[in-house]
Image (cartoon, rainbow, N blue to C red):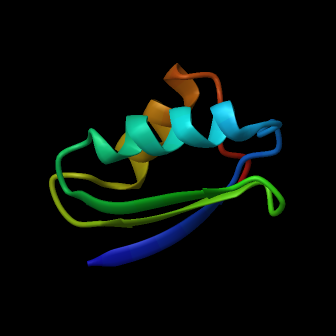
Amino acid sequence: METKTYSIPNISCVHCVNRIEQALLALEGVDFAEADLVGLSVTVDFEPPADDQTIRQTLEMIGYPATV
């Protein structure tokens, strides 16, 4: 299991938080996803088949690209 925190500078409301969490939790291999409105980030616990590239692509597709 790998844990990563991604910086998401355009999180602006609870709707953003919910959208990010739902999209990431729908990925096979993602066990945990928690977006932080104050910290402008999302922390994800994942294992294969989920990987960093898949998570970043998903964030980009839903309009919340990771900057780090």
- Above or below, 11 against 46 in this view is above
Residue 8, placed above or below residue 58: below
Position of the N terminus, as image quadrant, is bottom left
Q: Residue at x 83, y 37 (%)?
A: 12
Question: In the displayed structure, does residue 61 sit left or right of residue 35?
Answer: left
From this viewpoint, is residue 39 visible? yes
Q: Is residue 65 visible?
A: no
Q: How many marks?
A: 0
Q: Quadrant of the C terminus?
A: bottom right
Name the spot of residue 56 as percent of width and height, x first. 50, 42
Name which residue lies at 70% across and 40% down: 14
Residue drawn at x 42%, y 45% as measured from the top left: 55
Residue 19, position in %: x, y?
Answer: 53, 32
| Left or right of 55 in this view: 25 | left
The reply, left or right, for residue 19 in relation to residue 41 is left
Give above or below for 3 relative to 20. Answer: below
Tell me residue 37's x, y (percent): 76, 53
The image quadrant that residue 48 belongs to is: bottom left
What residue is rendered at 51% in x and 21% in y? Answer: 61
Q: Nearer the viewer, residue 56 or 42?
A: 42
Residue furthest to the front in view is: 14
Give left or right: position of 37 versus 52: right
Q: Position of residue 64 (x, y in %)?
A: 65, 32
